[in-house]
Image (cartoon, grey):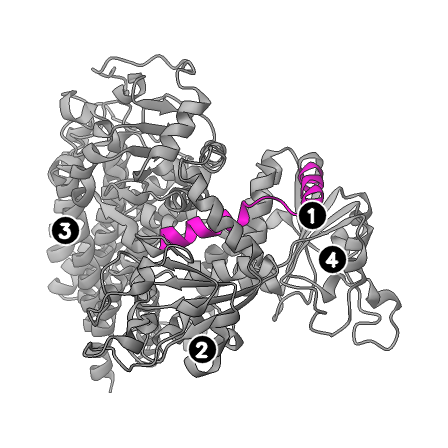
Amino acid sequence: MINFLNILIPILVVIGLWLMSRVPSAVKGNRLSMFAMLLAIVIALSTGTLVPVLVSILFILIGSSIGFHLAKKVTMIQMPQTVGLLNGLGGGASALVGIVTLMTPVNKFEAFTSVLAVVIGMLTLTGSLVAAGKLHRVLKQKPVVLPNHSLIMIVLLALQAVMLIWGGWFITADNAILIILLTAIFAGLFGWVFTIRVGGADMPITISLLNSLSGVAGGIAGMAIGNIMLVAIGGIVGASGLLLTQVMCRAMNRSLLDILLGKTSAPAGKASTVKKVESKKPQAVVSTNTLADDLQGAKNVIIVPGYGMALAQAQIQVKQLGDAFEQNGAKVRYAIHPVAGRMPGHMNVLLAEANVDYEQLYEMEQINDDFANTDLVVVIGANDVLNPAAREAEGTPIYGMPVLNVDQAKKVIICNFDLNPGYAGVPNPLYEDKEKVTLMLGDAKESLQKLLKELQSAPATAAAPTVSDTTTVMQSAKNVIIVPGYGMALAQAQMQVKQLGDAFEQNGAKVRYAIHPVAGRMPGHMNVLLAEANVDYEQLYEMEQINDDFANTDLVVVIGANDVLNPAAREAEGTPIYGMPVLNVDQAKKVIICNFDLNPGYAGVPNPLYEDKEKVTLMLGDAKESLQKLLKELQSAPATAAAPTVSDTTTVMQSAKNVIIVPGYGMALAQAQMQVKQLGDAFEQNGAKVRYAIHPVAGRMPGHMNVLLAEANVDYEQLYEMEQINDDFANTDLVVVIGANDVLNPAAREAEGTPIYGMPVLNVDQAKKVIICNFDLNPGYAGVPNPLYEDKQKVTLMLGDAKESLQKLIKKLM
C-alpha cells in the first residue's frame, strides 16, 4: 500500500500543477496538491520517524498554526515576499534533512547527496530571505554590488565544490560537524552574495529560480534519506520552477547565466546613460474636457497594470474603469507583461481577485502588435515594462528587454505615483510626450476614481433623440415581458438581462420572462442561464402560460431571439418554421429587439417584425452593449417626484464626515461586498471617517460579514462589533445599510411577543441620517415589520438590487 501511495502522490501533484496552469481550475489544482501533501505527511509519520510520533504531530500543529496565521494576515500585496519566504523555508528544511543525515553513519552516496542538500538548501534559504527582504522593503531594493563581487562568487563556488568532495568522500564522525558548519556558511554566503546583486526586472525571475532550487533541494534530500516520494515531488517542483524561469528569461530576452552573474542589473553608484527627466509636476496641458473626450471616444482600450497598482491595491478600481469603458461601448483588454509585479503571475492574481474576466487578460506576445491600432491605453503603476528606452538605451539595465508597445498607441493615460524612474532606474521618455500622453500623478486609486468620474459624467452623444423615444416607452411601461434567445447565450448577456429586469421593477413595472421551449441549443438552456444570473424562478413563464398576455403588454424586450417569435411561422407555408408555435411578441404594444443583425434566424426565414417601424425599435450589435444602453437610458431618464429626495441624499453624503456602514445578509445575496468597499473608499476620499458595524448574527454563520468584507480588502481595523460601536450611532452623520433588517429593527426594544423582542440591535435609528439599500420593504427573517421604513425625515430608501443601489450612491458621491 505504501509503495502504491509513493507512486500515486507524485501523480496527484503533477495533476494539481496541470490544473493550476488554467485559471478556471486553479483552485481545484491547489486543493488537490494540498491533499497530496497531507497524504505524504501521513505516510512519513506511519513509516517511522527519528522522534516520537506525538512530538512530530506537535511540531506539525505548530507549523500549521503559523501557516494558517500567515494565510489570514498576509495581504495580496505581500504575496511575492511571502512566496519568497516559503521558498526559503523549503530550502532550509532540505538543508536540515542533509545535516541530520550527516550526523549518522552514511555511505559515500548518502554523504555526497547530504552535503549537496545542505549546499542547495542553504543558498536557497539565504537567497530567498534576501529576496523577501528586498520585496518587503526592509533591505535596499536597488542592486548592491560589492568590490570584486564576481570574484567573491567564484571563490564561494570553489569552496562549496571543495566541501562537496571533502564531505562526500572523507567525512568521519570526527570532522562531520566542521564539514556541516563550513558547508552551511559557504552556501549561505553564496545565496546572500548572489541575491543582493539582483535588481530591476530580474527579481521575478530570481523568485522563480529560487522556487526551482527549493524543489531541487527537496529532491536531493530525498536521495540522501532514500525517500523515493520526496525525490519525485522535489524533481517535479524543481523542473516546473526551472521551466517557468526559462520561459520568463525568454520573455525578458535575458540569459539565466547573465542574471546569475549580475550582468543585467544596474551597477551601484553609476549614473544612467539615458537623459534624465526632471521630476517636476507637469503642466496641465490637457483640459478636463479633452480628457473626457478621449475617454468617451475610445472604442478600443488596453489597460496596462503594474506593480504600482499592487502597491495602491487599486485592482478593484481598475475593474470598475474597465466596466465603465465597456458600458460606453468600448472593447477592453488587459496587457500583462511577464515580469510585471514582483512574482510570476502577480498581475493575473490581483485582477482575478477583482473578478476581471480571464479572457480579457493578454500576454505581451499576444497583444503587442495591437497597440498601434488602439485608441487609448491606460497605465496603472507600470514603468519599466513599457519604457521605450529598452529598445535604444544601450548599457542600461533594461536594454534589450521586450517591452509593451504602449508608445505606439494613439493616446495614453499614465496613472503613476510620480515621475521617478522605475525599479531599474532608467528614466522613461514617455513622460516627455505632451501630445499623446496625459500624466495623472499621485495615488492610483484617486487617479482612477477621477477617470471613472470623467467617463461617467461626459455629455451624451448624438444618438440621444432616438434613444429619447425609447426612454419614454421604457419609463412608462408597467407590464414588461423579456424574451431571451440563443443570442443572449452567445453574448453571455444574462447578467445584463437581470440588471435590466431589476431596473424595470425599480421603476414600478411588473416583469416576466417568456421562455420558448426550443430557445437556445438544449432543453432548458434559457432557464439555466437566467438562473445563473439569479433571476427568480417565479418570473419564468413557459410559452403556453404567457402567450395570451402579450396583447396586453406595454413593452417586450427581445435579446438574441428570432425564429421563436417570427410571425411568419403562422402564414409562410413551405418554410421550415411554418406551423411552429411562436411567442406572440408581435401583438405587444411596443417591442425592442436587441439582436446582432437583421439576418434571418437559424431556419433562414426573414422576420417581418423587423419591418414594423411603428412599434418595433431595433438595437443591433453586441447584446451586452445594447442592454447597457437600455439600462443607462432607463436609469438616467427624467427624474420623478422623488428627485428632491435624491438631491438631498447627495448633499447628506457629501457633507457626512462620520459614516457607519451596516452590512447584512442581503449584501451576501447580492454579492455586493466589492461595491460596499468602493463606497467606503469614496467616503474616505471625501474626507469622512468610515467604520463598519457588524452585528454578531448578521448573515448565516458567525463571522459571515467579516469574511465577505475581508474578501473585498476592507481593513480589519475598520470592522467594529456591536458593543464597540453601538453608542456611537447617536453622533453619526450618516448610516448606510446594505441588506440588513432584523439586526437593526427598533421593534426589538418594544414589540413584546415578537421573535426579536429583547434581542440587542444596532442603534441605527439614533443616527442623524440613514440610507437603507434593501431589496424591498418586506419584513426580515423574523417577520417583524421595521418602523425605520416609515421615518421619512431621516431615512432614504433605495430598493432593489444592492449592487445597483450602491453604484448609484457611489456616482452621487463622486
In the displayed structure, would residue 450 be above or below residue 788?
above
* Residue labelled with disc 2: 547
Residue positioned 39% across, 63% down in the render = 558
In the shown orientation, is residue 748 left or right of residue 304? right
* Residue labelled with disc 1: 642
Q: Position of residue 124 (x, y in %)?
A: 26, 48
Residue positioned 29% across, 45% down in the render = 333
Q: Amino acid at mark 4?
A: Met
Q: Amino acid at mark 2?
A: Asn
* Residue labelled with disc 4: 722
Going from the N terminus, do you reach mark 1 or mark 2 first?
2
Which region is colored magenta?
A: 624-653
CA gap between label 1 and label 3 equals 82 Å
- Which of the numbered marks, if any, corresponds to residue 518? none
CA gap between label 3 and label 2 equals 85 Å
Q: How many marks?
A: 4
Q: Are marks 1 and 2 in contact (CB under 8 Å)?
A: no
Badge 1 density bin: few <14, some 14–19, many ≥20, Cα 10 Å: few
Going from the N terminus, do you reach mark 1 or mark 3 first?
3
| Tag in front: 3 or 2 | 2
| Tag in front: 1 or 2 | 2
- Which of the numbered marks, if any, corresponds to residue 164? 3
